[in-house]
Amino acid sequence: MATSDTCCTIVPYFKLTDENLPTFKGMCEQFISLTQNEEKVLYYGFSFNGNEAHCREGYADAEGVLAHFDNVGALLQEALGISELTKLEIHGPADELAKLKEPLADLDIEYFTLEYGFRR
């Protein structure tokens, strides 16, 4: 079964120190504020496991991913100044991932191709 789903998910993990964790959590509020009005965002939120943070985020398609990076770029750079990005994945169908690889070439991204599934 193939998929017609165009959803792309960004899967970042951040490592934080005890002293930077409260500041990063404050930035999460800013990320939420910036992201909540993006046209193609499907879901967005932060979860934590001790000093590790994960941003759970999905977009309607590659265009939504690129719009998000444009929207939060300055704040993301600030967040990366107090955290270590330990892993960054993007999941989506091959056609959508192809649209991301050149514009995001400067980032160390592991791409996962969605081949089977559905979205309601």
Image: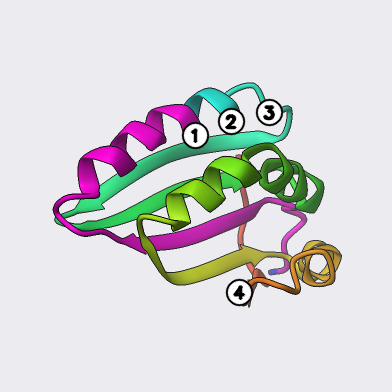
Residue indicated by mark 2 = 35
Which circle's residue, 4 or 1, is located before the other in the chain? 1
Residue in front for this viewpoint, 53 or 27: 27
User: Residue at position x 68%, y 51% from top?
Assistant: 7
Magenta span includes 28 = yes
Give the CA separation, mark 2 to mark 3: 5 Å
Residue 117 lies in quadrant: bottom right
Which circle's residue, 1 or 3, is located before the other in the chain? 1
Q: Which residues are magenta?
A: 2-30
Name the amino acid, label 2: Thr
Magenta span includes 84 = no
Query: Which label number is shown at residue 38?
Result: 3
Q: Are marks 2 and 3 in contact (CB under 8 Å)?
A: yes
Which circle's residue, 4 or 2, is located before the other in the chain? 2
Which element type, helix, strand or loop, lies under badge 2? helix
Residue indicated by mark 4 = 109
Which element type, helix, strand or loop, lies under badge 1? helix
Q: Are marks 1 and 2 in contact (CB under 8 Å)?
A: yes
Q: How is the image coloured?
A: rainbow
User: Residue at position x 71%, y 73% from top?
Assistant: 106
Give the CA separation, mark 3 to mark 4: 22 Å
Give the CA separation, mark 1 to mark 2: 6 Å
Name the amino acid, label 1: Phe
Which element type, helix, strand or loop, lies under badge 3? loop
**In the rendering, at what x and y percent does residue 67 appear?**
76, 42
Q: Badge 3: how crowded within 10 Å, few (<14), some, or many (20+)?
A: some
Give the CA separation, mark 4 to mark 1: 20 Å
